[in-house]
């Protein structure tokens, strides 16, 4: 920033005008302002903010692309706390048990407790605030409550059929009808 430290005149460059649009409450620095604060103000005023925003947007789009790839990796994808072999919360355990009852053994599970970026990222991606999250064929279905409801009303059997998967509950129902 061409503005000398302690100046109250303000900078009139395009970057400073844009920065003042983004940060309209940046007063002229007092003479007693620390060097760090002067450096921060000049960084904001000299156009570094747009570069920073561009970098953050790039990271966000690459993160979204990464999550797109993860949710489409398999026909059934679960983001959970723990693993299918050792769920670390009751809701994640319930999702695992529902899938097990339907005979769904081939699915990808991601332990969000191992990666905080993944944990927050998948919540942002789906706009759903809780874990676990279930995806069928790359589409967000919901959490434990939704999967339980789908199990109870028979919708999960139909959704699995669309994926080319036969629910094990159909075999159990046929066995009970013969009796």
Image (cartoon, helix red, strand yellow):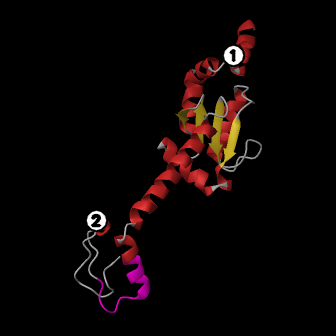
Callout 2: helix, strand or loop?
A: helix
Residue located at (43% from left, 59% from top): 53
Query: Whole-percent x and y of residue 142?
Result: 53, 36
User: Does 35 sit left or right of 122 as displayed?
Assistant: left
Look at discs 2 and 1 and give the one toward the viewer: 2
Which sits earlier in the primary sequence, circle 2 or circle 1? Answer: 2
Residue located at (56% from left, 22% from top): 155
**Residue 146 highlighted magenta (yes or no):** no
Q: Quadrant of the N terminus?
A: bottom left
Query: Whole-percent x and y of residue 143?
Result: 55, 39
**Front residue of 107 and 130:** 107
**Residue 33 highlighted magenta (yes or no):** yes
Q: Which residue is mark 1?
A: 170
Query: Whole-percent x and y of residue 7?
Result: 27, 86
Query: Image height check: is 165 above or below 140?
Result: above
Kindly tell me whether residue 130 is visible in this rendering: no
What's drawn in magenta, residue-wise? 29-41
Residue located at (69% from left, 20% from top): 165
Callout 1: helix, strand or loop?
A: helix
| Residue 148 position by quadrant | top right
Residue located at (66% from left, 34% from top): 73
Dot 2 crowding, Cα within 10 Å, few <14, some 14–19, many 20+: few
Cα distance in 3D space between marks 2 and 1 = 68 Å
| Residue 42 position by quadrant | bottom left
Residue farthest left in this picture: 9
Kindly tell me whether residue 64 is visible in this rendering: yes
Query: Image height check: is 38 above or below 24?
Result: below
Query: Whole-percent x and y of residue 150?
Result: 56, 27
**Front residue of 95 and 51:** 51
User: Does 141 sit left or right of 4 as displayed?
Assistant: right
Q: Which residue is mark 2?
A: 14
């Amino acid at each position: 920033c061409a503005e000398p430290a302690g100046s109250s005149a303000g900078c009139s460059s395009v970057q400073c005008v844009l920065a003042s649009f983004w940060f309209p409450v940046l007063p002229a620095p007092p003479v007693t302002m620390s060097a760090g604060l002067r450096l921060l103000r000049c960084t904001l005023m000299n156009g570094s903010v747009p570069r920073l925003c561009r970098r953050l947007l790039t990271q966000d789009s690459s993160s979204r692309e990464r999550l797109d790839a993860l949710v489409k990796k398999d026909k059934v994808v679960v983001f959970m706390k723990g693993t299918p072999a050792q769920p670390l919360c009751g809701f994640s355990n319930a999702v695992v048990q529902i899938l097990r009852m339907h005979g769904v053994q081939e699915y990808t599970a991601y332990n969000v407790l191992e990666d905080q970026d993944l944990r927050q990222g998948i919540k942002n991606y789906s706009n759903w605030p809780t874990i676990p999250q279930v995806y069928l064929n790359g589409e967000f279905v919901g959490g434990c409550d939704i999967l339980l409801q789908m199990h109870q009303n028979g919708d999960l059997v139909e959704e699995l059929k669309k994926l080319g998967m036969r629910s094990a509950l159909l075999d159990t129902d046929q066995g009970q009808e013969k009796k």
